[in-house]
Image: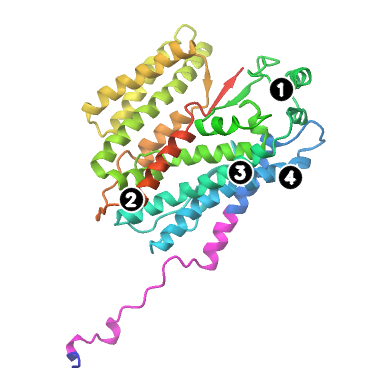
Amino acid sequence: MPFPQSNIPDEDQIVPVQQPKNKPGAWTITKHTLLFVATFISVTLVGIFWVGQDANVDSYLEMWPQGALFAALLLAFLGFHEFGHYFAAVYHKVKVSLPYFIPIPVGIGTMGAVIRIEEQIHNTKKLFDIGLAGPIAGFIVSLVILLYGFFTLPDPSFIENFSGHEEVIEYIENTGTFPETPPVPASEDSVIIMLGNTLLYSFLASFFENVPPMYEMYHYPFLFAGWLGLFFTALNLTPIGQLDGGHIVYSLVGYKKHRKIARVVFGSLTALAGVEAIPFLFVSFSEWIPGFEYSSILIWALVLFLLLRKGFYSEHTWIAPVWALSLIASVGYLYFGIGSFTQSGSLIWTFWSFFLVYFVKMEHPPVIYEEPLSPGRRRLGWVSMAVFVLCISPTPIYFFN
C-alpha cells in the first residue's frame, strides 16, 4: 500500500546525505603530514645531543644520522600508539581526527602526539577498545625496540664515542665493565643525568651483558627510545580522568569505584611530586635566601593543599587525609630514605600533577550505556594496569652534580 502523500517530504525538506566519517581530505592529510615532518626534524636535532657520537666529529651535521635514527624509533612508538586509538575509533564508527604530532625543540624534541575524538562515546565497550588500543600498540612497539637494543648491545668501549666521559672510559679500560655508580663530576658546573629504572627494564636488562648503567643509557638510541616509549605508555595508563588508563578503569569498574581509584592514585603521584618539588625549593632558597631552606616544606604543603582542593572539588573528607599522607611520605622519604633535601629531580611529577588537575581532571565523565565487558576485554584491561606498574618510574630523571 502506498504511503499517504502527507508523509512524503517536500523537495526542500529532504535532509542531505551526510559525508562518511573519518574520510580526511587532502588539506587535512597535508596538515598532519607537515606536523609529522616538523616533529621528525625537531626530534632529530635534539636527538643529536642525546645519542650523537661527538668524540671524533668536526660538526653536528656529521651526527644527523644518529639523531634521525632516534627520531624514527621514538616516532614509531608515538605513531603506533596514536594510530591504535585511531583505527579502533574507525572500527567503532566514532569520528576522530588524524594524529597531531607536536614538535618542540627542547627535551626530546616533541611533546608527543594526540588525536581528537570529535563526538561523544556513549558505550563502555567502545570507550574501552579505543582507550586500550593505543597503549597496547605502543607497548608492543616499545618492547620490540628495547629488546632489539639489548640483543645488539656493543661492548662497554662504545662509550669512547662520546666526549666528556674520561673517568668512565678509564674505568672500562681497567676493568672491562661500567662503574656501578656515577663518577664524581669533573667540576661543580658538570651535571650527570640519571634515568630512573623500572621493574620491566630492570628485569629485561638482567638477561644481557654489557648493559650500560642508567647514567649512560641515553647514549644508546634503541634503549633510550624503548625506555621512553614504555614510560610514556605508563603515563597514559595512569587511571585518572580521560587518560587512556582512566577510560580503561572506568570501563572495568564503573564511575564510583573509578572515582576512588583515581583519587588514591593521584595522592600517590603528589607524594612523588613532593620528592621533586621540596628539594628544588630547598636548593633555590639556599642560593637566594640562606637560612630559610626548610620553608620549602611549608610552601609545598600549601601548594599541595591547593592542588588537592582543586582536584577533589573541595571535598575535605578526601583532601585532609590525602594531604597529610602525601606530605608525610614525601618528607619521610627525603629525610629517612635519601637522607638529603638537595637531591635534584626533573619536576616531571610536579608538572604531571598540575596537568592532571587543570587539564585532565580527576573524574571520568559518565557514559550513557555502561555495558559489562567480555572476559577477554577484562583480562586485557587488568593486564594494561600491570603494564602501568611495570613501566612507571618513581624517579624518571634526576641529576648528580
Which of discs 2 and 4 lies nearer the camera? The answer is: 2
3 relative position to 310: left or right: left
Which of discs 2 and 3 lies nearer the camera? The answer is: 2
Q: CA distance from mark 2 to mark 1?
A: 48 Å
Q: Is residue 11 magenta?
A: yes
Which of discs 2 and 1 lies nearer the camera? The answer is: 2
Which of discs 4 and 3 lies nearer the camera? The answer is: 3
Looking at the image, residue 154 lies above or below residue 31: above
Q: Nearer the viewer, residue 302 or 338?
A: 338
Badge 4 is on which residue?
Answer: 65
Q: Identity of the amino acid at label 4? A: Pro
- Marks 2 and 1 close (CB-CB < 8 Å): no
The magenta stretch spans which residues? 6-35
Q: Which residue of the protein is positioned furthest toward the front in this rendering? A: 207
Q: Nearer the viewer, residue 150 or 121?
A: 150
Badge 2 is on which residue?
Answer: 375
Disc 1 packing (10 Å; few <14; some 14–19; many ≥20): some
Q: CA distance from mark 2 to mark 3?
A: 30 Å
Q: Which mark is residue 145?
A: 3
Disc 4 packing (10 Å; few <14; some 14–19; many ≥20): some
Dot 2 or dot 4, earlier in sequence: 4
